[in-house]
Image: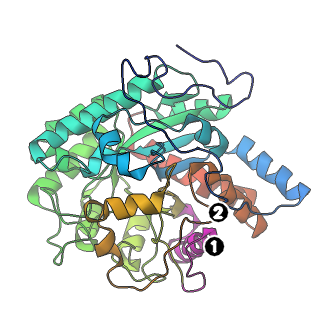
Amino acid sequence: MVIKMVAENVEPEYRSFSYLEDGKDFKSFKLVSEIDRVKSRKVPLTEDEKARVEGIFKKYPAVSMHDHPFVLPSDLGETYEYIKRNRIFFGYRGLYHSRLSGVFDGLLNSFNLINSDRPWHWNSVVNELGMRLCDIDHQDFALQCRRVGDITEAHKTGRLAVIPHLEGAGMIENDLDRIDILFGLGVRCIGLVYSEANYLGSGFKEKRDGGLTDFGHDAVERFNKVGMTIDLAHVGDLTSLEAIEASRKPCLITHAGCRSLWNTKRMKNDEVLKALAEKGGVLGIEAAPHTTISPDHPLHSLESVMDHFERAVGIIGIDHVGFGPDTMFGDHVGMHHLFSRELGIKAALSSVKYQEVEFVDGLENPSDFPNIVAWLVKNGYSDNEIGKVMGGNVIRVLKETWPR
């Protein structure tokens, strides 16, 4: 069942798995609203500024370097069962309002929330990926992204190119050929490590970073050959530096911030950021609750996030910065509490004191992405600079890393 919505320029009517019978083919859950779940504020703009923002979105493709654009249950207590049943609803309506032309879709099973039995982790990832792409193939607003040209086409037609993204490579275990298989199944970006050490190297949670392993070196070489973009968002400092050095192609840090501004291990130090930029890579500034906090804006908000953006621009230049908000549709703070151990939340925040917020005001979910462009317009950035950071920089890296 394909729902036509692009030509009419109206939000999609399709909801995930509408090609099946609710209650017969799958169990449904009451899900949160994708729009206005909470009162996340908008950047106030004059009419001239609004017109400029609109012109920028028409001229330049916007790409989120990392989000989790699924829809959570209204009752977070049902989240375990919701994920285990593997029919995780995609936020088509909310993503329409995001104005994005491309989104790195962070699949849940890449960090093994439910299945602690490692040999089954591979099956969990493949099952979730297949279910997502099957759903996408039943509508025409979102499309699976295999080439950079798919992002360009999505921008031209008012659609969304979905880039399957795994935050950690633990599921490949010690089998290099699984990299080829994942690429063939549609994955286009993989994090070497999700917080904890694996066969490839060390994550930020480890007390001692052992660096890139011999197998990790082999994996980096295979990523380069296959055309898989390497992500270092959750990777330890030494492992990150050695991966950047080992890679023939630029890497991404899809969602992080500046440790010089907020001193947690989840943020990246200047040495890693400079090494990333020297090889042509890009940092995506993240906005998941209680990550990119700043001294000037200790209550996590759009302003805190943009403090990290400006610090990063000062360190590595505007050609090497983008945005990976790391948002979702639902109670993100509640999700962090529910999966605190699996997500490494305690380890990430163990070195700092902070005041918890209910949500990140101004960047609560993917539909808030236009606030980033509005803030940049409001704060004096040129159209060319905005075009780079809203998508141009990461597209440049994808052109260098993906097959032509």
Q: Along the line of sight, which residue is nearer the eye, 243 or 131?
A: 131
Of label 2 and label 1, which has the lower sequence position? 1
Q: For mark 1, what is the residue?
A: 303
17 on left or right of 244: right
Asked if residue 254 shows in the view, the reply is: no
Q: Would residue 313 be counted in the magenta stretch? A: yes
324 on left or right of 246: right
Q: Along the line of sight, which residue is nearer the eye, 259 or 32?
A: 32
SS at circle 2 = loop
SS at circle 1 = helix
Q: For mark 2, what is the residue?
A: 362
Q: Residue at x 35, y 32 (%)?
A: 186
Q: Would residue 353 be counted in the magenta stretch? A: no
Report the magenta stretch's main SS. helix
Q: Is residue 196 above or below residue 352?
A: above
180 on left or right of 228: left
Residue lying at the far top in this picture: please name it: 1
Q: Residue at x 22, y 32 (%)?
A: 181
The Cα atoms of the two marked residues, 2 and 1, are separated by 8 Å
Q: Residues within 10 Å of mark 1 (few under 14, many from 20)?
A: many
Marks 2 and 1 close (CB-CB < 8 Å): yes
Q: Residues within 10 Å of mark 2 (few under 14, many from 20)?
A: many
Please state which of the two labelled residues, at mark 2 or mark 1, is closer to the viewer: 2
Q: Is residue 153 above or below residue 84?
A: above
The quadrant in which the C terminus is found is top left
Question: In the rendering, at what x and y percent does residue 14 appear?
Answer: 57, 25
- Segment tinted magenta in the rendering: 295-319
Q: Along the line of sight, which residue is nearer the eye, 341 or 237?
A: 341
Q: Amino acid at mark 2?
A: Gly
